[in-house]
Image: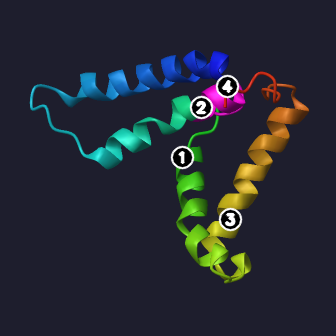
Amino acid sequence: GPRKVPAIADKVGKGVEEIFRDMGREGVVDLVKVAHGTFWPVNQAMFGDMTIGPQITPGADEWFHAFDEYIPQVTGGMPAKMFDEMQDAAAKIVAMFESSIKDKNHLNAEQCPV
């Protein structure tokens, strides 16, 4: 609910602030870089710092992007099994969450800010 918004907003804000700080004096950054830069803080706020993070699950951002790339085709009626990259990414994502839940590192529904 609304009371949980500051938790995710603060975490994402810090991630975006880092992107802008790394931008340097030119004052220009690719919008896709900003979007990619929010991946870790958004997911850490939702699932927990011990579930997902660049040091814990390196490459997870690529897994999610590879999975998401085929959503239009799958929601349009094409079978997901047609897309090997999507299937490989899904297996890695599921394994990540299963491991975190097994280790009791995963935020529960009450803790998730969204």
Q: Earlier in the sequence, mark 1 or mark 4?
A: 1
Q: Nearer the viewer, residue 60 or 10?
A: 10
**Which is more foreground, mark 4 or mark 2?**
4
Of helix, strand and loop, which one carries label 3?
Answer: helix
| Residue in the image at 87% along x and 26% along y | 104
Tag on residue 88? 3
Tag on residue 18? none
Tell me the CA gap for discs 4 and 2.
Answer: 17 Å
Identify residue type, mark 3.
Asp
Q: Earlier in the sequence, mark 3 or mark 4?
A: 3
Tell me the CA gap for discs 1 and 3.
Answer: 14 Å
Regarding residue 54, the answer to whether it shows in the image is no
- Asked if the residue at tag 4 contacts the one at tag 3, i.e. Cβ–Cβ closer than 8 Å, the answer is no
Of helix, strand and loop, which one carries label 1?
Answer: helix
- Asked if the residue at tag 2 contacts the one at tag 4, i.e. Cβ–Cβ closer than 8 Å, the answer is no
Tag on residue 113? 4
Report crowding for label 3: few under 14, some 14 to 19, many 20 or more residues within 10 A (C-alpha): few
Tag on residue 61? 1
Identify residue type, mark 1.
Asp
Judge left or right: residue 39 versus residue 14. Answer: right
Where is residue 57, by image quadrant? top right
Q: Earlier in the sequence, mark 1 or mark 2?
A: 2
| Residue in the image at 75% along x and 43% along y | 96
Outermost residue toward the left in this view: 26
Q: Earlier in the sequence, mark 2 or mark 3?
A: 2
To which residue does mark 2 refer? Answer: 53
Judge left or right: residue 37 versus residue 7. Answer: left
Identify residue type, mark 4.
Pro
Of helix, strand and loop, which one carries label 4?
Answer: loop
